[in-house]
Amino acid sequence: MRVGIYALYFFSFFPFVTLYNWGTDTQPYALMVSILILLGNRLRMDKKMIMLANVSVFAVFLMLIYGDFGFNSLRSLFNYLSVFFVSWATYTALNKTKGLNEKIIKIFINIWLLVASVQRFIKPDFMFSIVAGARTSSTRGVPSLTSEPSFYGYMIIFSFLFVLDFKEDRWVYMINLLIQLLFFAQSSVGVVYFLIYIGIIGVSYVFGINVRRLILVMGGIGLFYTVMWRMDVFQGTRIFAVLSRLFSDPRGLYYLDQSVRSRVNHIVNPINASLKTGFFPKGFAAAYQEFGYSRIMSGYGAAIYELGIVGIVLIMHIFRIIYSANGHVNRKYNALFVSIIMFSAIQLASPILGFYLGYCLFKNKEHCLAMASE
């Protein structure tokens, strides 16, 4: 059991590491380990997991009804199986170990930093041989142990949510992750995620009508602006070009940047098409026939298009799991934040999401037990 738990931690925080080419960036190892953990443990499912289980069963039946058994359809089904099984296995594992192992996550964060440092200063393709589809370019940051800098960026962001609850060295690891995001990943979408989170916290502070908080928020934004735009290290990079245009001409960014336009279309087109059909489930192969997408590059956009109204229920339930995670720092803001960023190119199959949901479920149970004992 303990070996399985360590493996679950590893494959959730290193979901792109592999020695075999499965044909995907995100690897299935976390899902496999999760199933093994659950087979070897009889811990009862938390009632908040029942909806995740129902969605995964619905996804299986949807595939059978539509008869979509191609590789891309199976990969889409993997999204809904993964978010359920990984979250349940994580909840089971954390109950077994009486909480999150901070030391392991700190080691993982430092490994990312070490690998990224070597890639940036010594050997750009360092460790690419064990990462599925590792790629970058001279104008982008490094991917560390992920497939590309943008994936490195969202792994950093999700790790930040765990670091919020660290009992020791919390600020050290917040700074560590921020350095990795800005100076190594240099992911424009990762920085946008960070700005969204700061914006959510900032708005809550401002509406508190607290002058001191308002000054702190504005000062933080000013400091961030100074670091991002006044340091020569960002000149000529993609992150500088994208974010500069984002602030100066967001509409122009959509028309001139093919990558940005593609990301936006992968969110807007599926949701718009689903809306027109009253959120009727379209299955896993329709996106290719309708838009030419082999896969919808939007976690929640894909859920709404493929599962229809059930996808909306799934999104609302994930929000509820995070929102109700009593004892988790900024749980309400985190619920809104995750709901926003999951419309971007973060797949539901990413095991870091399932691991985070399992952690939120455990935090709520831990809090309830603590309250009951008082």
Image: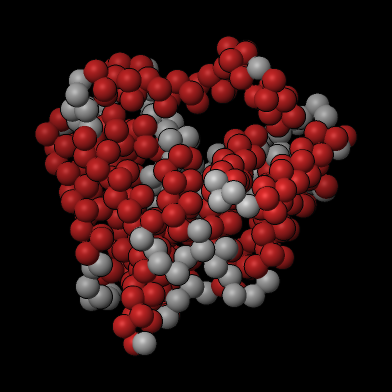
Towards the viewer: 8 or 311: 311
**Residue 362 in view, yes or no:** no
- Left or right: 58, with 254 as reference point: left
Whether 254 is drawn above or below 149: the answer is above
Whether 275 is drawn above or below 373: the answer is above
On the image, the x and y values in percent for residue 238 come to: 71, 28
On the image, the x and y values in percent for residue 136 come to: 66, 35
Whether 236 is drawn above or below 374: the answer is above
On the image, the x and y values in percent for residue 156 come to: 60, 51
> Looking at the image, how many numbered discs can be counted on the residues?
0
- Left or right: 128, with 117 as reference point: left
Q: Residue at x 29, y 50 (%)?
A: 317
Q: Residue at x 51, y 63 (%)?
A: 329
Whether 301 is drawn above or below 51: the answer is above
Q: Where does the C terminus fall, quadrant-wise?
A: bottom left
Towards the viewer: 216 or 222: 216
- Left or right: 49, with 119 as reference point: left
Q: Residue furthest bottom?
A: 373
Q: Residue at x 58, y 56 (%)?
A: 160
Q: Where does the N terminus fall, quadrant-wise?
A: bottom left
Towards the viewer: 77 or 131: 77
Q: Residue furthest right?
A: 232
Figure quadrant of residue 76: top left
